[in-house]
Amino acid sequence: MASKSTRRSLLPAFLLLALLLLAF
């Protein structure tokens, strides 16, 4: 269960990181 929650939280976090990289 915890793994699923972490994966869901990682999805948006990864997207944010990609956006930051693109902005850079």
Image (spheres, helix red, strand yellow):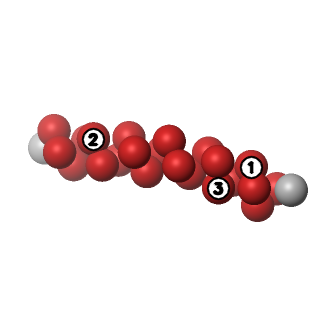
Q: Is residue 21 left or right of residue 17?
A: left
Could you give the CA–CA distance between mark 3 and mark 1, rounded to whole angstroms?
Answer: 5 Å
Horizontal side, residue 19 vs residue 7: left or right: left
Q: Residue furthest bottom?
A: 3
Query: Who's the residue at 62% across and 45% down the image?
Result: 9
The secondary structure type at the circle numbered 1 is helix
| Residue kind at label 2, given as amino acid type | Leu
> Given the image, on which type of amino acid does mark 1 rest?
Ser
What secondary structure is found at the residue carrying circle 2? helix
Q: Quadrant of the C terminus?
A: top left
Q: Residue at x 74, y 49 (%)?
A: 5
Q: Which tag, 1 or 2, sits closer to the chain's start?
A: 1
Q: Residue at x 40, y 45 (%)?
A: 15
Q: Quadrant of the N terminus?
A: bottom right
Marker disc for residue 7:
3
Q: Mark 3: which secondary structure?
A: helix
In this picture, residue 20 sits left or right of residue 6: left
Give the residue at the far left of this rendering: 24
| Residue designated by label 1 | 5
Crowding near the residue tagged with mark 1, few <14, some 14–19, many ≥20 C-alpha atoms within 10 Å: few
Expressed as whole percent of the image width and height from the top left, the position of residue 2 reads 82, 56
Image location (x, y in percent) of residue 4:
75, 56
Residue, disc 2? 19
Residue density around tag 3, few if under 14, some if 14–19, many if 20 or more, within 10 Å: few
Contact between marks 3 and 1 (CB within 8 A): the answer is: yes
* Distance Cα–Cα, label 3 vs label 2: 19 Å
Amino acid found under the numbered disc labelled 3: Arg
* First reached walking from the N terminus: tag 3 or tag 2: 3
